[in-house]
Image (cartoon, grey):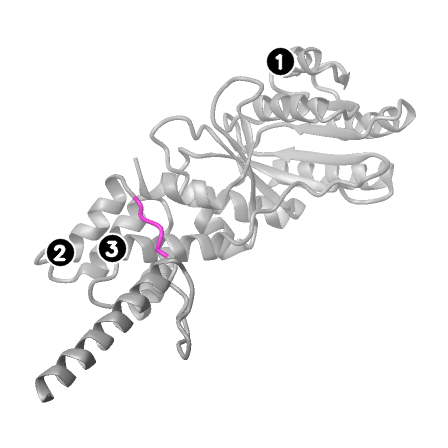
Amino acid sequence: MPLLAFLVIGAALLGALVARVIVRRRGRVAPGETMEPRPSRPTTFEGALASRIRGLFGSEAADPWAELEGLLVKADVGPGTASKIVGDVRERYREGADPSALVGEEIERILGEDRALALPVEGLGIVMIVGVNGSGKTTTIGKLAARFAEQGKKVSLAGSDTFRAAASEQLEVWAKRAGAHLVTQERGADPGSVAFDAVKAAEARGSTVLIVDTAGRLHTKEPLMEELKKVRRVIEKAAGRSPDETLLVLDATTGQNGIAQARSFTEAVELTGVALTKLDGTAKGGVVVAVRDQLGVPVKLVGTGEGAGDLESFDRAAFTRRLLGD
């Protein structure tokens, strides 16, 4: 009799266990139980940098944290921002965790929520484009004009780069592709005068967007930066307000010098965003993490090629995958 009772109790326990497994697999909770939420699976990064980061913690590295900081500096994240990321990851790291995933999470946190261009729903929206020589300003303006045209906007362009040879000609080619109206003057004309005329012409023809080109200039040349300030003041006078967007076109291959560029242009014309160009090769563009961290300027656009359609809204998750991957 005791043996029979033992078998009965054992069968009951086994049946309860089987039932519990079944309801769990079906996503239901057994009576008297609470189902704990399943933890979300962390993002897994694959690629050269992610692999090196993981390798630091699986090796005999004397100081993996110092080496991690070095890897981030080499990725153009900048010393100050790299140090901050490493400090935050170090606090969160636990044995068995994926350090590359933690680094990615910190980078995304610094970059913040994705920010779109902020233009008025009605009336004329004004976008001022600035940057150093060779950063890809004219190409970015052409792509942006094409993008706005595809959205059904009526686009005007201001050729306020009156010093560089063939600047107006290049802008004219892009204007024709996008069906945009171009306002320009002869070479050597006052850039502020062109900007003023462009604002008034855009308002008169009912344009919904005006993109103002400016001459590429070294951020270390004070007279040139003063001239840029003047162009902005002229736009404010003509439109009765500041440009809705002032975008710094930043070459992804620039490296950490991009931080100095962004700081100088922010002080001169109050940047609202960055358009990161030439992200179509091996360049990672890690400098924008430091720009966002140190100056608070968000990335809004990314150029990935030479075609008119190769301009995308910034996606922090995709950017982070690229930075940590191949």
Whether label 1 touches label 2, CB < 8 Å: no
Say which quadrant the N terminus sits in.
Answer: bottom left
Which is more N-terminal, label 2 or label 1? Answer: 2
Residue 249 percent across, percent down from the top left: 55, 34
Q: Amino acid at mark 1?
A: Gln
Q: Amino acid at mark 3?
A: Leu
Q: Which mark is residue 313?
A: none
**Disc 3 target residue:** 68
What count of labels does the image hold?
A: 3
**Residue 69 in view of the camera:** no
Q: Secondary structure at mark 2?
A: loop
Q: Residues within 10 Å of mark 1 (few under 14, many from 20)?
A: some
In magenta, the rendered stretch is 41-45
Q: Which mark is residue 58?
A: 2
Say which quadrant the C terminus sits in.
Answer: top left
Which is more N-terminal, label 3 or label 1? Answer: 3
Residue 125 percent across, percent down from the top left: 78, 36
